[in-house]
Image (cartoon, grey):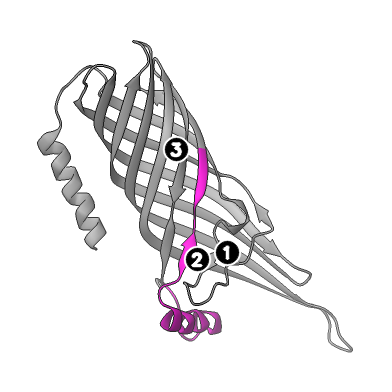
Amino acid sequence: MKKLLLVVAAFFAMNAFAQEQGDDNGFGLKLGVGFGGSSYGTVDYGSVIKIDGNTNSYSPAFGLSLDNRWYVANPGKFGIAIDARWLDLSIAHFGDKTDYTEVKSNLVKFEMFGPGVIGTFYINDKMAADLYWNIIPSLAVTGHDSKVTTPAFGNNPETVVETEDTDFALGMSNYIGAAFRFKVFQAGVEYNIAKLKYQDWGKNDDNAEDALNDWANSIFGNYKQNLNNFRVFVGFKF
């Protein structure tokens, strides 16, 4: 809650101190591909114990972000701007498979209203380089399709049990990045630091798996979903 209040306060500060300096204020669009590796989407139970494992199938996280910038200083070749990342949306797929179990997971991460700061170096009147940082509230929704196969044994035939489940994780993400701009085009890289706390929304205490998760949470604290990833993007800055 304290972090969310800081975000709100930052937006009030934007309105209070934003100035019209230069002609580089504007709207930005980024289309990106994120690479989180084999630990993307897995669970970290804290410093006492880690059971995060590795995924053995993973797709890049495809996403887009929308932002506005307002420059508060443009002394010559350098500029400093406050930034509002209005929306960041990304989707990814990952999963685990063994001889008898298979879990396929689809994730959507929603992020809105993230304040930040941008430093700009103007190479000439057509090219510029940006360094930036944003912090933004984040919600991750992960749907799991699980299949457990019990092989035939003796007179018992093979059985297959399929289940569906949805997990939610909430927290704050940080984006640290750099971009090169040529006229209205931009391209760059950014690193997203995102370990979001799992929420118990919609969980059933009578369900054995949910009860086990609640027990682990009570002992080890709020466990987190690891969504750290490195993103490459292209886009526009108008």
Work out how far the residue at label 2 is from the one at label 1, CA to CA, in angstroms.
6 Å
Q: How many marks?
A: 3
User: Dot 1 surroundings within 10 Å: few (below 14), some, or many (20 or more)?
Assistant: some
Q: Which residue is mark 3?
A: 64
User: Dot 3 surroundings within 10 Å: few (below 14), some, or many (20 or more)?
Assistant: some
Q: Residue at left 68%, top 69%?
A: 147
x, y (%) of residue 119? 31, 30
In terms of sequence position, does the residue under pointer 3 or pointer 1 come before the other? 3
Q: Identify which amino acid the numbered label 2 is placed on.
A: Thr
In terms of sequence position, does the residue under pointer 2 or pointer 1 come before the other? 1
Q: In which quadrant is the C terminus drawn?
A: top left
- Magenta stretch: includes residue 221: yes
Q: Identify which amino acid the numbered label 1 is placed on.
A: His
Q: Is residue 76 left or right of residue 128?
A: left
Q: Nearer the viewer, mark 3 or mark 1?
A: 3
x, y (%) of residue 221? 41, 77
Q: Is residue 24 above or below residue 82?
A: above
Q: Is residue 220 visible?
A: yes
Work out how far the residue at label 3 is from the one at label 1, CA to CA, in angstroms.
23 Å
Say what secondary structure mark 1 lies in. Answer: strand
Q: Which residue is mark 2?
A: 166
Q: Which residue is mark 1?
A: 144
x, y (%) of residue 165? 54, 68
Q: Is residue 213 above or below residue 130?
A: below
Q: Residue furthest left?
A: 16
Q: Residue at left 17%, top 21%?
A: 21
Say what secondary structure mark 2 lies in. Answer: strand
Work out how far the residue at label 3 is from the one at label 2, CA to CA, in angstroms.
23 Å
Q: Which residues are magenta?
A: 202-231
Q: Are marks 3 and 1 in contact (CB under 8 Å)?
A: no
